[in-house]
Every structure is written in structure tokens, then in C-alpha cells.
Image (cartoon, rainbow, N blue to C red):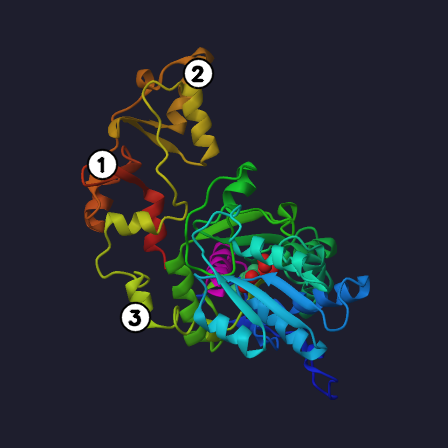
Amino acid sequence: MRIHRTPYDNVLQTVGQTPLIRLNRVTDGARTPVYAKAEMLNPGGSVKDRIGLAIIEAAEESGALQPGGTIVEGTSGNTGVALAVAAAVKGYHCIFTIPDKMSIEKVRLLKAFGAEVIVTPSAVPPDHPDYYNNLAKRIAEERSNAILADQFYNPVNTEAHYATTGPEIWEQTEGRITHFVASPGTGGTISGAARYLKEQNPEVRVIAGDPIGSIFTTYHRTQNVEPGSPYMVEGIGNDKIPSTLHFDQIDEFRQVCDRDAFHMARRVTREEGLFVGGSTGLIVKVAVDVAQEEDDPEACVVCILCDTGERYLSKVYNDEWMAENRMFRPERVTAAYLIESKADAGPLVSVGPGASVREALDLIEEHNVSQLPVLEEGRPVGSVTESALLGAVMEDPARLANEVREVADEPFPVVDADAELSEITSRLTRQNPAILVAENGSVCGILTRYDVIHHLMP
Ligand SMILES: Cc1ncc(COP(=O)(O)O)c(C=O)c1O
């Protein structure tokens, strides 16, 4: 950790060398120690200070950025602040395009450093000209002496974390780190730090937290780019695959819902005295889960605290906003609530009675589920489980070509979206590993015993 024994020439010299701080209360008694790298203590308030400076210095070295030049970026805020801090010290002009779902505090903050901010619509597809990154690119091309920081595709991003974040963590844990937890936005932090840590010790396990709705988790498992869905945590996850995210450095992805992420962010602030944003809540949730599962006092989990909670005073730390967005845990737990909180939320995966057993097994593998409802025009007509299908095929491989209707079991029971936890648990039995949830007469989701247990665990 940095000890400020001598004065600095300017604020940029204080980027990085952030402290590693043990989390004591939010770990709920886990025996594995969890340490947090307090990146919100960087001068710009986030982990992005490391790359803002590195990107500008690389552009200066290559000659792409000359004195008095302009730095352009599509940014959800923190990279903008990082670039704006460095630009202020070095005398550059900044233009940022920022999607309208981002906190108003972030826009004001960028303007405070003298940057020009253009707010763009969130609800446009990534190939639309108004998509914030496309607009930033156009502005950088049209201006003279301007560079696009390009954090999602600029290798300097990942290299900055390889050169600083990784070595700092290795040194601060004296090589004892066993698990590294971070959440990719651009992926620079996790990919760069992971590469360094794995070079020192290939056994270090790297775990990525990902918001439900982001496409990264599915991509990691299947290499398919499937459509994402909206989520509220800012700065992490994505609806496209950036080149700064190196999937080969990541051992595992775990998905977390907005509610759990925000709940944990508030706990980290109140119980640890560390004021952090929503993405940090998501990362700490994963880190604590890993620590509890490991249950080993000799292991050492390190996670990243990405940015300061001050950027979310109107959202995560505003009770009205939390209530309006149904982010508080309800007093009455219903089937609809459990469906919303599911770790693998997405459209219901089902199979038709006329599909082949092979198709059903492919679906089970692709979506990483153990069972499928058999639906005909939205009505449950049967169910299949992986173990029953595999058993049938092992007995006679020709059954792969059979229709699902020939091998299906009874349909899973159906409960209403408004059904309470007691009804749900009583319907989930050894015979019924899953139940279907219906809203206004049509099936809208599936709940397994795992989903209920996941809810009951703290
Ligand atoms: C708040 C916040 N958390 C986490 C991240 C993820 O870091 P990275 O882009 O290095 O993956 C970002 C990135 O923008 C962020 O803004």
C-alpha cells in the first residue's frame, strides 16, 4: 500500500496502490478470509483511473495525441471521470457520450471536470448510429487531433491491470491469494489482473460475477452470442463481447440479480464502512458465496471494490428509488418473486411433444438445466428429466430418434404467480423436482428445489 512520505508532482501520481481491506461482517461468519481491493480510493473514485491514465499516456507515446488534443469516449461514467482527471492535469479537452440509463450524478461529475457530455438513448441496438459507442467513434473520426479512448477494444486497458492491479494484489497477499473475484464490464480488470495472478500461480481460481441479463455467462459456456435483457446494475455485464475481455483467463461465471447486488452494496457500506456502488455489491455477493463454499481458513479470496457509492445516491442509496424498482425484499415471497430472482433467469426453456429425444437432450445441455417441461401451445402436457432421458437412451440408443411424447412423464404441477412460499415448497417433492408458474392462465416460468434453497440461504 502507498505510504505518502513525500509530496507528489500532481494527482495522477496517486493512481493505483490502493489498500487491500478485509471484509469482516458481510461474510456472515465464513471461515475463508475475504479481502477487498478498495479501488474507489483512487483520485477519480474508481478502478478506471488506472486505465484513463494508461490510455492517454499510450496515445501520447504513439504520437496519436498532441498537446491541446481531444479525448473522446463512450462511457458509463467512471472511465470518463478517469480520463477527465488525467485530461485536466495534462490540458486536454474531453467529449463523452453516455447512455441515458446512467445516474445523473455521473453526468454532473464529468461536467465538473470541464468535459462535454452528450446523453444518448439506452433503448437503441448496438448497431444504431445513436448507440453511445458509435456516436463517440464518429466524433473522434471527424475531429482533428482527437483520439477515441476505446476502452472496450483498446489493449492498453487490459495491459494496465496486468501491469498494476495484478502485481499489487499478489504483493499485498504475499502470494497467498487462492480466488480472485471481479465483474467484467470491458473485462480489462479481470482479464489483466487474472493473467498476472495465474502467471504467478496457475492454481488461482478466477471467478466473474455477471448481472442477470448480461450475455457474458452464456457466451462463456456456449460461445454463442445470445440476446441479453435489461438490468439495472451499472458498469458491468454487456450486450456485446469486447476484445478486452479474455474469457480464457476466467474459470467460472456466476450470475446475480440486481436486487441481491444492491442489497449487498448497502450492507458493505453499513457493515464495513466502505461506501461502494451496485457493481461492487454484485462482486462482494459472489466473493462471499465463494468464501462460504470453500470454508477454508487457509484459502484467500480477493475481490474488487469498483467505485464509490456517491455515484449512486439517487439510486441504490435512495429508498424511494429502491422501492419503486422493487429492489427491497418483499414481506410476502411469491412464485413471481422467486422467478424474478432466479440466478439463471431468461425465457422459459421448454420442448414440444413432437421434438426428438436428441433435441430435448441438446436443449438440456445448451441451457444447463436438469429437466424440461413439455408444452403444446403453451399448455403443459408432460415433462422430461435429464436422468430419465439418459437412462432410456443408454438402454437403447435408437430412442434418440423417438418423439418426446413417447418417453415423457406427467407434467410438472402448476402454481399461480401469486402462490406463496409454503405452497411452492409443498409442491416440490422428490417426484416433482420442478413446478411451473402460470400468470393469467399461461405458463411463464419454472421453479426447482434449487431455486427455493437459493432463496432460503442468506
Ligand atoms: C462501476 C463499475 N464497475 C465495474 C466495472 C468493470 O471493470 P472493467 O471494465 O475493467 O471490466 C466498471 C467498468 O466500467 C464500472 O464502471
Which image quarter is the C terminus in? bottom left
Count of numbered tags: 3
User: Which amino acid does the dot numbered 1 rest on?
Assistant: Ser
Ligand 1 within 8 Å of the CB at mark 3? no
Which image quarter is the N terminus in? bottom right
Task: For the residues labelled 3 and 2, say whether their Cβ atoms are less than 8 Å apart.
Answer: no
Front-lying residue, 150 or 264: 150
Extent of the magenta region: 279-297
Q: Nearer the viewer, mark 2 or mark 1?
A: 1
Classified by dominant secondary structure, the portion drawn in magenta counts as helix
Task: For the residues labelled 3 and 1, say whether their Cβ atoms are less than 8 Å apart.
Answer: no
Is residue 298 among the parts visible in the rendering? no
SS assignment at label 1: strand
SS assignment at label 2: helix
Q: CA distance from mark 3 to mark 2?
A: 54 Å
Whole-percent x, y for residue 356 in the image: 40, 18
Nearer-N-terminus badge (2/1): 2
Q: Judge the density around disc 1: few (<14), some (14-19), many (≥20) Cα neighbours within 10 Å.
A: some
Is residue 409 among the parts visible in the rendering? yes
From this view, report whether residue 295 is shown above or below residue 428. below
**What's the residue at 34%, 46% (across, down)?**
451
Q: CA distance from mark 3 to mark 1?
A: 32 Å
